[in-house]
Structures are given as C-alpha cells and as structure tokens.
Image (tube, rainbow, N blue to C red):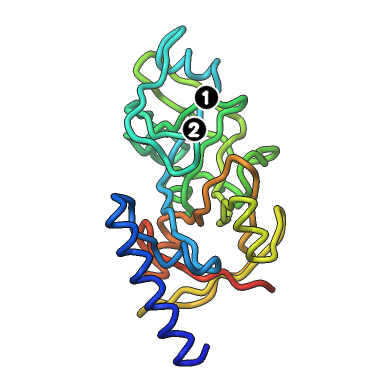
Amino acid sequence: MSMHSLIDRIVAELLAQGRAAAAGQSPLTAADTDPALVPVGVSNRHVHLSRPDMDALFGPGSVLTRMKAMKQPGQYAATETVTLRGPKGEIGKVRVLGPLRKETQIEVSVADGFALGIKPPMRMSGKLDGSAGLTVVGPAGSVTKDAGVIVALRHIHMRPEDAVRLGVKNGDSVDVVVSGPRGGVMHNVAIRSDEVSATEMHIDVEEANAFGLTNDALVRVRKV
C-alpha cells in the first residue's frame, strides 16, 4: 500500500468515527474497514451438555442460568459449573456453555489432558467419534462419558458476506498472521461460515499465550 493510500484510509476512518459519534453510534474498528482483520476470542476449558446429562448433573428439568452472552449468536456462558475427573486428577469450576446440545462435548487444552490423565484428540467441534472420555461431576450427580472430550482445532467463524469479501468459503483453510513481540503465522485455520455466525477467530488459551494474544486482538487472515 502506498503512503498516499494509507493516509487516505486513516482520514476515511477518522471521518467515519466522527460521523458515528455524532449519530450516537459505535465508531468503526479496523476490522470494519479491512476485511482481512478479524478479532480473536480466547476459549478456556468448557462444557456443552446434552439434555440427559444436564438432568443427571443438575437435577431433572433443570435449566441453565444465563450469565453472559457470547459473540456467536444465541450462545452464552452459564453460571453453572462442573468438575472434570480423569484417571490422574480433576479440574473444578469448569464453565458450562449454553444452549444445550444433542451431545455432550467437553473442550480442554493439551495441558488439561496431562493433568486429567487423558489424551483428547485435536478435532473440530462435533467430531466426537473415538475421542477421549472422563467423568463429569455436578451438584446433583455425575456422568461418565466414554467419548466427548477434545482439544478444539483453531478456526474462524465468519459471516457469509465477510467470507465473500475475503474470497474464502466454509471449509477452506487459511493462514493467520499475528503481529507483536510474539508474532508469527498460524497455519491450517479452518473457515466456518454460515448465516448465524459472527466473524471471530477461536483459539485456546495455550495458543493465545504462545502468540501473546488476548480477547478482541486483531489478526490478519491470509489465503493459501
């Protein structure tokens, strides 16, 4: 990009921010003006529960209590937590995310697997066949799962219009370029695009720490 183009972009962003402020709207971010920039969402260990497992852990007919909305439409963090128990140890106060799902899915980090004494495979969400198992403990009971525990592969949720602007589609793999003191390139990042997605890259805490990233940091998508 030439210096004149860069100056023109900065001026355009400042003018847009001024118009938005005058209209009482949120100012534009860099991600709004450059489709290659996407915000990061750092995912800690968490659990998605099925209806039968919710009943077993929290009592028949129990419902999740919404605590905080997630960026992905319809998803939220609940006040409810559980304990994960493996052959070598346990991890308490693991957040349950809503809404309920058809199958229970437990997402942990590689280090969590060592602490629990299990070897969860790296998988995309929903790919649970042959995954690791453990016992989930709640206030009303416990359930032992033969499968359902994964280390979630990094991916980018993307609105269809953003995918079009970037020239990518659902199922594509891209590189993600990270700037800063711990900057680098993440390869094999899957695009997950559908009508109910908000554009956001999901990584776990280990990946975030390795690249010096926090929630809402901007990273650059690069087609391969």
Looking at the picture, does residue 95 appear above or below residue 9?
A: above
Q: Is residue 172 left or right of residue 3?
A: right
- Relative to residue 124, is residue 106 depicted above or below? above
- Marks 2 and 1 close (CB-CB < 8 Å): no
Gap in angstroms between the C-alphas marked 2 and 1 = 11 Å
Residue in the image at 52% along x and 24% along y: 100
Classed neighbour count for the residue bearing mark 1: other residues with Cα under 10 Å, few (<14), some (14–19), many (≥20): some
* Crowdedness near tag 2: few (<14), some (14–19) or many (≥20) residues, C-alpha within 10 Å: few
The numbered dot on residue 100 is 1
Relative to 9, say whether 78 is above or below: above
Helix or strand or loop: what does disc 1 sit on?
Answer: strand
Image coordinates for residue 99, horizontal then vertical, percent: 49, 27
Residue drawn 45% across the image and 27% down it: 136
Tell me the quarter of the picture where residue 224 sits. bottom right
For residue 192, the mark is none
Residue drawn at the location 47% of the way across and 68% of the way down: 219
Q: Between residue 150 and residue 195, name the one nearer to us.
A: 195
Marks 2 and 1, the one that precedes in the sequence: 2
Residue 140 image position (x, y, % from top left) = 38, 13
Q: Which residue is mark 2?
A: 74
Taking depth in this image into account, of 205 and 75 the one nearest to the observer is 75
Q: Amino acid at mark 1?
A: Leu
Residue 107 horizontal/vertical position (percent): 50, 42
